[in-house]
Amino acid sequence: MQVWALIVDSFRDAIDRKIFWIMLVLSAATAGAMACVSFDAEGVNVLFGTWHIDSEFYAVGSETGRSAIAATIIKIVFDLSIGWVGIILALIATAGMVPAMMSPGAVDILVSKPMSRHKLFFGKYVGAMAFVLMQATVFVFLTTFVAGWRWKCWILELLWLIPLTVLLFSYVYGFCALFGVLTRNAMASLLLTLVAWVGVWAPQTLYETFVTFEEQIDPDQRYQRAVGALKWVLPKTQDIPLIAGKLAGAALMSDVIATESGTVTDGKKEPTIDPRQAEERLSDVNIAVSIASSLAFEGVLVAAASILFRRKDF
Amino acid sequence: MTLQVTEITNLAIDLIGVRKTYRKKVQALRGVNVQVGRGEIFGLLGPNGAGKSTLVKIMMRVVRADAVMGTVLGRPLGNKNKLAVTGYLPESHRFPGYLTGMQVLDFYAALARVPRPVRRSRAPGLLDRMGLTRWADRPTREYSKGMLQRLGISQALMNDPELIVLDEPTDGLDPMGRRDVRSMLLELKKAGKTIFLNSHLLSELEMVCDRVAILNEGLVARQGTLAELTQRTVEYRIRTSGDLQAIRGEIEKRSGTIRNGQIVLGGRDAQGVNELIDLLRQNGHLIEAVEPHRLSLEDIFVEALGQSTAAPAVSQTGGRKA
């Protein structure tokens, strides 16, 4: 009853914020933009057939086309809307929840209720997740529906993007909750979280760089091992799109990655990354290990925040 | 043994040796003992920084004591089952502005483990009692300070508490609102509730409290019923015509003092009053009035803080009687 009340309260808090509605409008706008595009056996129709782009890659009916469309949706979800833009918007919306809970006058009543402070903190934490769950559900349902309706490509596996988006947000929100308890200030916790996010992103990117250019910059793999260890400990945010690709059946997402990063020569796009290498990278992701180790780190952050919250005098 | 059990069960709050030091520097409480009987209205007084809010916050788990023994509602401090039957209104409370009055009551009552059907049935009555029915579905960000205060009191009563802890409950209320709160407190007392009040409005406490404690510099300076506290500070004032200076020595022999042209005799010594009247008549003074005067809580409060403006004789008399 108590945790549910906190979740409902977070929901009410969320819908009271303008950013909640801005995110919904963005979701609708993205789905609307997707609806302006459709695919047929020969390629892509833009603006309800105003322009037609010939493409074998996106040809409806082929397995390649299906995977390409799935990969495109994943890219839209993670790179554009629910990716860093969406996560930042969600952080803006939720960064104030913990500091608001701890503000003088508000916290007094809350901690005087017959529930442990851990439960109270956890309830608020879950409430922030519920906010993102709502946004992700709306967005993914919309995009999946538009992909099915307009792109003739029903990929129900895309619904995996809902929990994965929440998971990605939770990796980052762990920092936000901790900084919220430490600073009791929404803006400070938001800025510190963004810094921490960069701190999480950097080892992952560095590791990829060391792997890709191993022979040129790190032949004895010294840096690769050090950064790899750090990457293993920290939340693996960059694995989420790859996990989504695997779960959503976008097996050829590697081709998308390879082709999109390619250069156009004589009117034909040549991939600069070997598609096989990219595909190997996709299949390299161990979902269980990636999620479990990331959640373990998040768990440490949340536990630390909860312990600090329990020990505080207000 | 039976007596001890009875005493324990009759105490709603029995705190012994409450200590709290902030940041190893500021000693907020230095071994406070507070006993509150079940079904009584208890007032906590003290100047700013005396440690009143800290004591209330310790009772409500908002602040952790460095040391504390005793019970609240017969259980150790912070017992969840007892917190479920405790209502609390903190000073300068803040409700989320996005919640309506009805949602505020529902939310906090849910945290207090009040079942949903009970919440649904109880909230309208409380809002009505506080004159907030018309505002029940408006977000609290639109409420005035007085309305928020009344909503806060409703919130504290949503779980039908056995013990109600109110920190400055009339803060922000107009005179009518204050009167409503006072009558509500007396109604709650009639219903058998124990009420712990923290207020700086001494006159209001005087009107409703059975017992008070005066806290100063982290210690209880005085504690008892209002009658107990005021008993030794009752004084008689005798107004006469004529010059009293001529018989000053005689007056002082009978423990009287001359203040503002009146004779003041501390305590409840009716015999002493009669002796003084005889003295005055013997010396040809016309007695215009003899008035028993009971000091206000404010007088006691000031005296307890060692800043009494009352005549030294009153204190001396009180001390003599004690």
Image (cartoon, grey):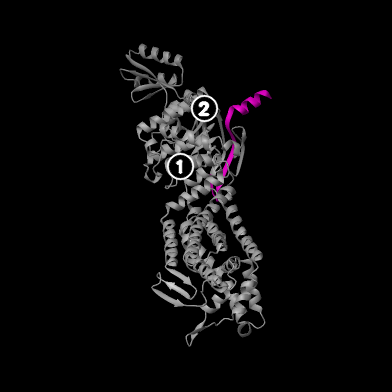
Relative horizontal placement of residue A26, taking residue B63 as reference (left or right): left
Relative horizontal placement of residue B258, taking residue A203 as reference (left or right): left
Q: Check disc 1: other Cα within 10 Å, few if <14, some if 14-19, many if 20+.
A: many
Label placed on residue B103: 1
Relative horizontal placement of residue A188, taking residue A305 as reference (left or right): left
Residue at coordinates 66% horizontally, 79% vertically from top-left?
A221
- Residue A45, given in percent of the width and then of the height, sits at 43, 72
Amino acid carrying label 1: it is Gln
Label placed on residue B40: 2
Above or below A143: residue B248? above
Residue at coordinates 55% horizontally, 76% vertically from top-left?
A257
Q: Which image quarter holds the N terminus of chain A?
A: top right
Label 2 vs 1, first from the N-terminus: 2
Above or below B43: residue A246? below
User: In the image shown, does A49 or B25 lie closer to the viewer?
Assistant: A49
- Residue A24, given in percent of the width and then of the height, sits at 44, 58
Q: Secondary structure at mark 2?
A: loop
Above or below A2: residue A74? below
Asked if one can make out residue B44 in the rendered structure from this viewpoint, the answer is: no
Amino acid carrying label 2: it is Glu
| Farthest residue, direction right | B1
Asked if one can make out residue B110 in the rendered structure from this viewpoint, the answer is: yes
User: In the image shown, does B18 or A274 lie closer to the viewer?
Assistant: A274
In three-dimensional space, the C-alpha distance between marks 2 and 1, rounded to whole angstroms, equals 31 Å
Label placed on residue A289: none
Provide the residue span drawn in magenta: B1-27
Q: How many marks?
A: 2
User: In the image shown, does A282 or B52 lie closer to the viewer?
Assistant: A282
Quick check: is B59 in the magenta stretch?
no
